[in-house]
Amino acid sequence: MKKIFITILLVAGAATASQAQKYRTAAGIRLGGDQFGATVQQRIAEKTTLEGIALVGSREYSGTLLYQRHWPMLGKRFNYYLGGGGHIGNLKDQGVFTGLDAIVGVEYKINGLPILLSADVKPALHFNHEDWVNLATGISIRYVIVPEKKEKKKIWPFGKQEVEEEKSGWPFGKKKEPEPPKKKVWPFGKKEEPVPEPEPEKRIDLNKIFKKKEN
């Protein structure tokens, strides 16, 4: 187990320090000593995860919940983590036991694949168990089920830039041009213009004509 742990350290240390694909949920298998089981890791905050471990051995089975804090080492693909938690299980011929756990390990995200490799040391303090203290080592292989969503690049450094225009006009916004007067429409259809009255006929006054000739 120690050789496997050192091998993972060397492989991860030789890897390129490129940007990692963050993950939200990863699950897989865990091997350690005479026990094997399943592991599920859930990211709950930046650099913080919860890990649940279910292990089965020759004489016992147990479940463990761990709170872990991650720090990058050689880029975001390779990091180490520390944490702690508790466990509960059942030991043959002994019954139910509980305990406290600590953990320290390293984790590596394989470039181009949704696979996480990790190796750790997990000391445990047992209550109602034939072994009060246990120093276990293990390796885990997890598959990224839910990757972290990639953030869209923002041109404006403080978020989406919104341009607001003042309706009051110049000089605090776009100057508002005066609107042309609207044509009034007759509400009951096309307005009919009044027909002009005919002019009265002009009559020739013969008396005035004869009087001008006599003069």
Image: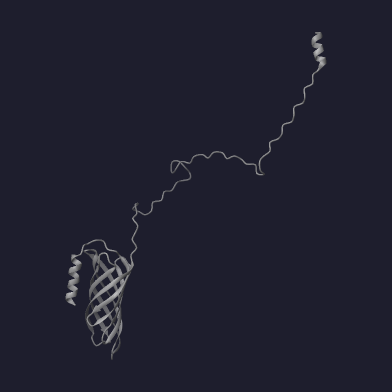
* Most distant residue in the top direction: 215
Frontmost residue, 194 versus 157: 194
* Most distant residue in the front direction: 112
Vertical side of 212 occupied by 140: above or below:
below
Q: Total number of numbered labels?
A: 0
Picture coordinates of residue 141 (x, y %)? Answer: 26, 73
Picture coordinates of residue 33 (x, y %)? Answer: 22, 81
Frontmost residue, 128 versus 114: 114
Task: Tell me the quadrant of the picture where the N terminus can be found.
Answer: bottom left
Residue at 24% of width from left, 80% of height from top?
Answer: 124
Task: Tell me the quadrant of the picture where the C terminus can be found.
Answer: top right
Quadrant of the rendered image containing residue 180 = top right
Quadrant of the rendered image containing residue 214 = top right
Vertical side of 204 occupied by 96: above or below:
below
Query: Coloured how?
Result: one colour
Quadrant of the rendered image containing residue 34 = bottom left
Picture coordinates of residue 201 (x, y %)? Answer: 77, 24
Frontmost residue, 40 versus 189: 189
Residue at 16% of width from left, 75% of height from top?
Answer: 3
205 lies left or right of 34: right
Picture coordinates of residue 13 (x, y %)? Answer: 18, 66
129 lies left or right of 189: left
Vertical side of 202 occupied by 146: above or below:
below
Residue at 19% of width from left, 68% of height from top?
Answer: 11
